Image: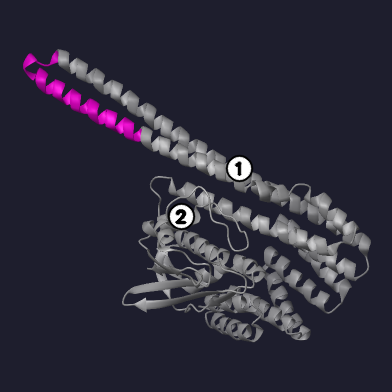
Amino acid sequence: MAGAYLGYGINLMNIDKISESKIYITKALQVARENNDIKNEMLAINNLGIVDELSGDYSSALAKYNIVRDHNEKVKDTIALAYIYTDLGSLYTNKKDYPKAIENFQKSLYFYEAVHNPIGMKDIYNELIKVYKLNGNYKKAMECSDQYYILNDSINNLANIKKMTEMSMGFQHEKDLALKEQTYNQELKRQNLFKLAMAFVIFLISLMFVISYRAYNLKKRTNILISKQNENLEILNATKDKLFGIIGHDLRKPATSFNGITKKVNFLIKENDFETLNKFGNEIEKNANELNNLIDNLLGWSMLQKDGIKLNPQKINLFSAVAEVLEPFQSMAKEKNITIHNEISIDNYVEVDEQSLYIILRNLIHNALKFTNKSGNLYLNTSREKNRIKLIIRDTGIGMTNSEISEMFNFHSASTKGTANEKGTGLGMFIIGQWSKLNNIKVNTTSEKGVGTTFELVF
């Protein structure tokens, strides 16, 4: 329960509802202390410090940060120390005490280096660039800028190469398995025919008719099996070709945006053209999100092709799950000025495979934001009917016709662009349909052109 209160409070804080956020984080602190939950207690104190900092109460924020810092130093939690020194650095930056801000950011950098966390190191170098500029030390700011872009390029290149390599290996592995199975069946056919031939010689002439009849049936069944396997292999190869077409087409634009990124950014910094630099950064972030969504859906499709998927149903809090899925979409909603109304009760639990639920929610929420115009709304709530729980996701987007609804769960080789020209793989709704069937989740859809769409997940 402490985690649920804390997650809701952080979500409210992210949408600038500071007063309401403080109420729920304080509840989380009380529950954690009652249950002697030290981890959530420290997280609650830390987030209350962030709330105080956002409210301008720097003294109270500093006191709370110091409590968390002292605890983490006592238990020697390296990654937690990296986080709290980052918060302290931000606090001193807001207080315009730049030497102390630099000191705390450098301590945070030390701990991120200790745990080999390049993403954390990149973020700290970014903060140091800002503080050194505010402090008038442009030489140090430039040194930190060089380190930041070295780490950023390294992280992006390694992540993209790893995902594409894993995907390629997955396709090749499935193809090899199919070929091995076909070879095995052909060898089995030859062995069976050999046995039948030997039996024909050994058995009495009176049994010849029976043996011949069985040989005929076996040959027929074997041919049907091979024909079916060849048909499935052709379908798999055709689908694979479509996916490689998607990869080649949809990866081109986001991948191109990363070419020469360091040179472009360094040039804009030297020219002090921060307006263009900001636009360039936003475009890169948008392309990175498109690339991430593309890879997520391709990996989801790859998992569906494997036989014997093992589901692990467990009791999951719907509010916490939705809040976690919404987090990476906040920037997309903010860019389109879409208001997200999360009205899900914190007391609703469902029995479902966690990975499946997150795949379904990510695609539904992404589609809702993708096809909603600027200044629109996204509503999320729940209802209960007897022993069933219904999760309702409603948007005020462009809507669908009845024919589009009837076809939406089929695989398409190309997707429809969103209201801000967002792109996709054409796999999203297909994946939702497949994972819903596997988890016995009923999906009800209603829509009206120009008004919006409502999805109901019935657990």
Label 1 crowd bin: few (<14), some (14–19), many (20+), radius 10 Å: few
Please give left or right for residue 147 compared with residue 25 in the image. Answer: right
The residue that disc 2 covers is 431
Callout 2, which amino acid? Ile
Q: Nearer the viewer, residue 346 or 406?
A: 406
- Quadrant of the image occupied by residue 110: bottom right
**Relative to 266, does residue 328 appear above or below in the rendering?**
below
Is any atom of residue 302 visible in this view?
A: yes
Please give left or right for residue 237 compared with residue 331 in the image. Answer: left
Judged from the image, the secondary structure of the residue bearing numbered disc 1 is helix
At 22% from the left edge and 27% from the top edge, which residue is drawn? 218
At 8% from the left edge and 15% from the top edge, which residue is drawn? 204
At 60% from the left edge and 66% from the top edge, which residue is drawn? 329
Please give left or right for residue 9 compared with residue 49 in the image. Answer: left
Of tags 2 and 1, the one toward the viewer is 1
- Return the disc, 2 or 1, that comes first in the chain's sequence: 1
Judged from the image, the secondary structure of the residue bearing numbered disc 2 is helix
Is any atom of residue 167 visible in this view?
A: no
Decide whether the magenta segment is chiefly helix, strand or loop. Answer: helix
Label 2 crowd bin: few (<14), some (14–19), many (20+), radius 10 Å: many
Q: Position of residue 92 (x, y in %)?
A: 82, 76
Callout 1, which amino acid? Gly
- Colouring scheme, one of rainbow, by chain, secondary structure, one colour: one colour
Q: Quadrant of the C terminus?
A: bottom left
- Quadrant of the image occupied by residue 76: bottom right
Q: Position of residue 458 (x, y in %)?
A: 37, 69
- Quadrant of the image occupied by residue 119: bottom right
The span shown in magenta is 202-229
Q: Which numbered circle lies on residue 248?
A: 1
Q: Nearer the viewer, residue 59 or 196?
A: 196
Q: Position of residue 365 (x, y in %)?
A: 53, 66
**Relative to 282, does residue 42 appear above or below in the rendering?**
below
